């Protein structure tokens, strides 16, 4: 595939590495901050492009997507923080009979972790001696807590477990209620992201951990999703791709 990379920051560079490893070519790197070959997406720049992979920032995303849609160039969007524009963007894609796939987590490993945790949360429904809880670690620059991945994991636990009804993310000055899922966050060092779900009973303890070593898992998932998109038309999420990949 001949691929345009929009947003040539930390993720854009990782994506370039993976594209080259998988035998694809780079058509153009577009970066508003001047780090790429040019600063704007244009109709001319999209000529001969098989797919666009965009991990930029949410400002300006609508404009870029309009150009991809008008030229019917499929696009994979990893940029986060544009949920408020989702309906408008879906209309742009469908009205132009074009193709878009987006997701807030492209790591295949993280999706395997979500599935394992969902299954584990359901397995203890009839065994109340097992409690369930979560701890996540991230580097000292992270601005939010708990992480988006922790919140997604917690939602999956609430959905599959019949005792847990709400998430508790603060410190506790009392005993935790049975219906509360404790999600604790630790910040420090360089850790790209560790999420551990523990199932604990009097007799034993079971831990499921996802340990992201770097950003390459996100980049690989995005490139694989762009390959999957080649024979598709319409508006997709990363879950559509992952479901087929893991043959759920
Ligand atoms: N979906 C996932 O799995 C996943 C994983 C990691 C990061 N992200 C998201 O990807 C995005 C990028 O992350 P990053 O760490 O590479 O950020 P970054 O700041 O390192 O890079 C973003 C780059 O995009 C450029 N840019 C901004 N607006 C642009 C526009 N309209 N057109 C072209 N270029 C533009 C900036 O100049 C910058 O170089 C963020 O939204 C982040 O939350 C998603």
Image (cartoon, rainbow, N blue to C red):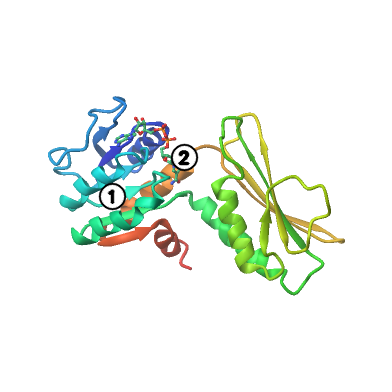
Q: Name the residue under label 1.
A: 75
* Horizontal arrangement in the rendering, residue 113 relative to residue 79 (left or right): right
Could you say which is closer to the camera, residue 209 or residue 9?
A: 9
Could you say which is closer to the camera, residue 79 or residue 4?
A: 79
Few, some or many residues within 10 Å of mark 1 (<14, 14–19, 20+): many
Label 2 residue SS = helix
The residue furthest bottom is 126
* Horizontal arrangement in the rendering, residue 98 relative to residue 220 (left or right): left
Q: Quadrant of ligand 1?
A: top left
**Where on the picture, by quarter, is residue 61?**
top left
The image position of residue 188, as x and y in percent, is: 65, 31
What count of labels does the image hold?
A: 2
Q: Quote the CA–CA distance across marks 2 and 1.
A: 19 Å
Labels 2 and 1 touching (C-beta < 8 A): no
The image position of residue 233, as x and y in percent, is: 25, 62
Q: Which residue is drawn at 21% across and 48% down?
A: 66
The image position of residue 144, as x and y in percent, is: 57, 39
The image position of residue 74, as x and y in percent, is: 25, 52
Upstream in the sequence, badge 2 or badge 1?
A: 1
Q: Which residue is drawn at 30% across and 38% down?
A: 6
The residue furthest top is 34
Q: Mark 2 points at which residue?
A: 216
């Amino acid at each position: 595939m001949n691929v345009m990379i929009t947003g040539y920051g930390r993720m854009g560079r990782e994506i370039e590495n993976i594209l080259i490893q998988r035998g694809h070519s780079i058509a153009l790197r577009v970066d508003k901050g001047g780090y790429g070959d040019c600063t704007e997406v244009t109709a001319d720049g999209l000529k001969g492009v098989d797919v666009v992979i965009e991990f930029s920032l949410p400002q300006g995303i609508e404009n870029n997507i309009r150009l991809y849609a008008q030229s019917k160039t499929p696009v994979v969007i990893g940029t986060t923080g544009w949920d408020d524009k989702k309906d408008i963007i879906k209309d742009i894609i469908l009205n132009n009979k074009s193709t878009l796939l987006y997701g807030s987590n492209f790591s295949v490993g993280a999706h395997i972790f979500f599935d394992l945790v969902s299954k584990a949360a359901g397995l203890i429904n009839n065994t109340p001696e097992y409690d369930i809880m979560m701890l996540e670690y991230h580097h000292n620059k992270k601005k939010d807590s708990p992480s988006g991945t922790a919140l997604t994991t917690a939602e999956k636990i609430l959905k599959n477990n019949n005792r847990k009804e709400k998430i508790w993310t603060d410190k506790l000055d009392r005993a935790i209620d049975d219906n509360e899922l404790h999600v604790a966050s630790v910040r420090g060092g360089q850790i790209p992201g560790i999420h551990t779900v523990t199932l604990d009973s009097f007799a034993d303890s079971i831990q499921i951990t996802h340990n992201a070593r770097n950003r390459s898992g996100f980049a690989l998932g995005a490139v694989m999703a762009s390959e999957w998109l080649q024979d598709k038309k319409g508006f997709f999420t990363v879950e559509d791709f992952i479901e087929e990949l893991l043959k759920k």
